Amino acid sequence: MLLGTQVSIGPIFPEDFGPLFCWANDVVAARLDFAYRPIDLISHRQWCETIGKDPTRIIFAIRKARETAIIGYVQITNINSVHGSAELGIRIGEERFRGQGFGKDALGLALNFCWNHANLNRVQLTVFKHNKRAIRTYQALGFKKEGLLKQAAFIDGERIDLILMAALRPPQRRHRRSANVLRANAMPTVEPVSAAGHLVA
């Protein structure tokens, strides 16, 4: 489990299957990131039971700090260990938990996982052009706009443009500083000398 200032992200438990099923069938929430299509319970259970078996996908449950109820999830998908790349997605399940910084905190934890544990170099995502709140959150976390996919989605009767954004692994400045400190604190080099006290070339 990874702890942030407001939330934690960690494994999905069987008791989370119910809320996940409800969110998957929430037509209003679906308008924020995908086309709505009802999901039956059998298909949903099969999806839940295969979460940990796909090496190209990691799903974290989002929970408020010091609470056990799930409030959303973060997905890291299409993980490619050769290229060091993946795609990122997030869903805060209910409107009452949105706009409070929970999603931003969870995404920050997920990005740190990508850089420090999964050894990824690039994480990308797509976001609806009109989803200004999500775009601001992604930008605050270091995502940059890389392109526009014109009319790439059909949502609730409309053709929607998608913005492609990506974040690259930040420089390992902390590691370099640590190495410099170690070198600075190392014992001084003793130059070899001859028996006569002269430096040996």
Image: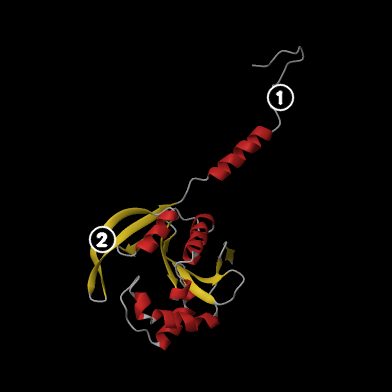
Q: Residues within 10 Å of mark 2 (few under 14, many from 20)?
A: some
Q: Residues within 10 Å of mark 1 (few under 14, many from 20)?
A: few
Element marked by disc 1: loop
State which mark lies toward you, 2 or 1. 2
Q: Residue at coordinates 43% horizontally, 68% vertically from top-left?
A: 90
Q: Is residue 120 above or below residue 51?
A: above
Q: Give coordinates of residue 118: x percent, y percent.
A: 50, 59
> Which residue type carries mark 1?
Val
Q: Residue at coordinates 46% horizontally, 74% vertically from top-left?
A: 96
Q: Quadrant of residue 21?
A: bottom left
Residue that label 2 marks: 149
Q: Of 146 and 172, which appears nearest the observer?
A: 146
Q: Of 174 and 137, which appears nearest the observer?
A: 137
User: Do the residues under discs 2 and 1 have CB atoms within 8 angstroms?
Assistant: no
Q: Is residue 23 visible?
A: yes
Of pointers 2 and 1, the one earlier in the residue sequence: 2
**Left or right of residue 3: residue 162:** left
Residue 190 disc label: 1
> Which residue type carries mark 2?
Leu
Q: Give coordinates of residue 17: x percent, y percent.
A: 49, 82
Residue 182 disc label: none
In the picture, the quarter occupied by the C terminus is top right
Q: Is residue 93 visible?
A: no
Task: Report how far apart the C-alphas of labels 2 and 1 lie in the structure.
Answer: 63 Å
Element marked by disc 2: strand
**Left or right of residue 112: residue 159:** left
In the picture, the quarter occupied by the N terminus is bottom right
